[in-house]
Image (cartoon, grey):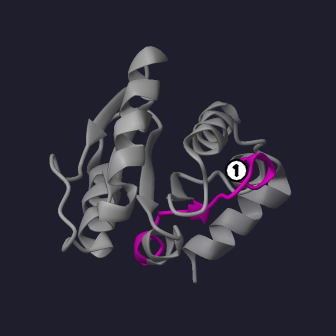
Amino acid sequence: MIIYLGSDHNGFNLKKDLKDFLTKNSIKFVDDGDDKLDPADDFPVFAGRVVNAILSSKEDDPRGILICGSGQGMCMAANRYKGIRACLAWDIESARAARNDDDSNVLCIPARVLKEESALSIIHIWLTTPFAKSPRFIRRIDEMDNI
C-alpha cells in the first residue's frame, strides 16, 4: 500500500502530523502537496495531483488522503474522476463503513472540524479496515463505475 497525500492551507498542519503518523507506522507515502503554507492555494489542485497519482500508480492498493477545511471540497473534486471512491469521514464509523462497504480509495478529512487525535484515529481505522468483498458491495461499486 502507498498513500498519496494532499492538502490545501487549511489542512497543511494536520498533513504534517499525518506524515509523522505514517512514518511511525512504517506506511509508505508521497506528499503531493505544498512544502510550505500558502494561504492562497486552491484545494482542486491537490485533489487532482493525488487522484492522478493513484490512477497512474503501479503500486498494490494505492490510496489517497486529502485534507481541507471542511473535507467537502476535496471530496467533490476527487469524485469527479472515474475509478475514485472518495469519502468524507468525520468519525470512526463513517471511515470504517467507507472501507468495508464501499472500498473507498480516497479519504477526505475536515481539518477545521476535527482535532488532531480524532483525525488520526479516523485515518488509522480507514487504513486498517479491509474491503468486505460482499457480492452486493461489489455490485454497487460496479454500478457506480458505470454511471
Give residue 120's quadrant in the image.
top right
The reply, left or right, for residue 145 in relation to residue 83 is right
The reply, left or right, for residue 109 in relation to residue 74 is right
Front residue of 144 and 115: 115
- Give the magenta range: 77-95
Q: Is residue 91 magenta?
A: yes
**Which residue is at a point 78% across and 52% down the rendered structure image?**
97
Judge whether residue 8 can be spotted in this image. Answer: no
Front residue of 47 and 52: 47
In the structure shown, which secondary structural element does the residue marked by tag 1 occupy?
A: helix
The image position of residue 77, as x and y in percent, is: 40, 76
**Which residue is at a point 64% across and 41% down the rendered structure image?**
126
Q: How many marks?
A: 1
The reply, left or right, for residue 101 in relation to residue 124 is right
Judge whether residue 89 can be spotted in this image. Answer: yes
The kind of residue on which mark 1 rests is: Ala
- Quadrant in which the C terminus appears: bottom right
Task: Note whether 53 is above or below 47 in the view shown.
Answer: above
Q: Which residue is mark 1?
A: 95
